[in-house]
Amino acid sequence: MTSAIVSYQHPLTESSREDVTYVVHTLAHKKMSTLIKLQGDLDQARIRLDEVHPLRFMEAVFQNKQNCIDLSDLKKRIIIWKPFWSGLKDNLKAQDKKGNLSQKDLEQFSKNIGIQFSEIHGYAEQKNWDSMMELLMKYKCK
């Protein structure tokens, strides 16, 4: 994901949802040797997803039960999870630093994924993205 300014106000396209599903599912379930072979396809999906706000990316995961299951499986693959989460977290930080991660965006995000804003507000305010992700996975990916 890129650190370019991308608007949360732009809804996720169906093709972007498909890219999110492809990336999360592939990283969660394919063998390392297969991931190496698929690197070009994964890079192309990542490039297309550079235009997606990180909260929209997360929405695509948390609004889809299978994507949530795949994210939980991905988290168990530490060697793959760490760079995946680091990239997503860096994008959250970059958007926040550029003033592109407003309380209004976070309120809409929480509504869109079906969680009370009060559940994530403190983590978002403190920029504690790790704890926010843990909470979201706990509530949405069970």
Image (spheres, rainbow, N blue to C red):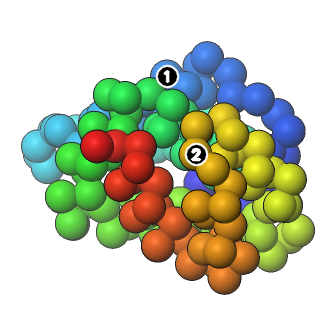
The structure residue drawn at horizontal position 34% and vertical position 43%, both measured from the top left corner, is 141
Q: Which residue is mark 2?
A: 115
* Secondary structure at numbered mark 2: loop
Select label 1 or label 2 by which is in front: 2
Q: Foreground residue, 102 or 28?
A: 102
The three-letter code of the residue at mark 1 reads: Glu
- The answer to whether one can see residue 116 in this image is yes
Q: Is residue 130 above or below residue 136?
A: below
The structure residue drawn at horizontal position 40% and vertical position 64%, both measured from the top left corner, is 134
Q: Tell me where residue 27 appears, x and y as whole percent.
A: 28, 44
Which numbered marker is on residue 18?
Answer: 1
* Secondary structure at numbered mark 1: helix
The three-letter code of the residue at mark 2 reads: Ile
Q: How far apart in space, not on screen, are marks 1 and 2 (Cα)? A: 23 Å
The structure residue drawn at horizontal position 48% and vertical position 39%, both measured from the top left corner, is 62
Q: Residues within 10 Å of mark 1 (few under 14, many from 20)?
A: few
Say left or right for 110 vs 65: right
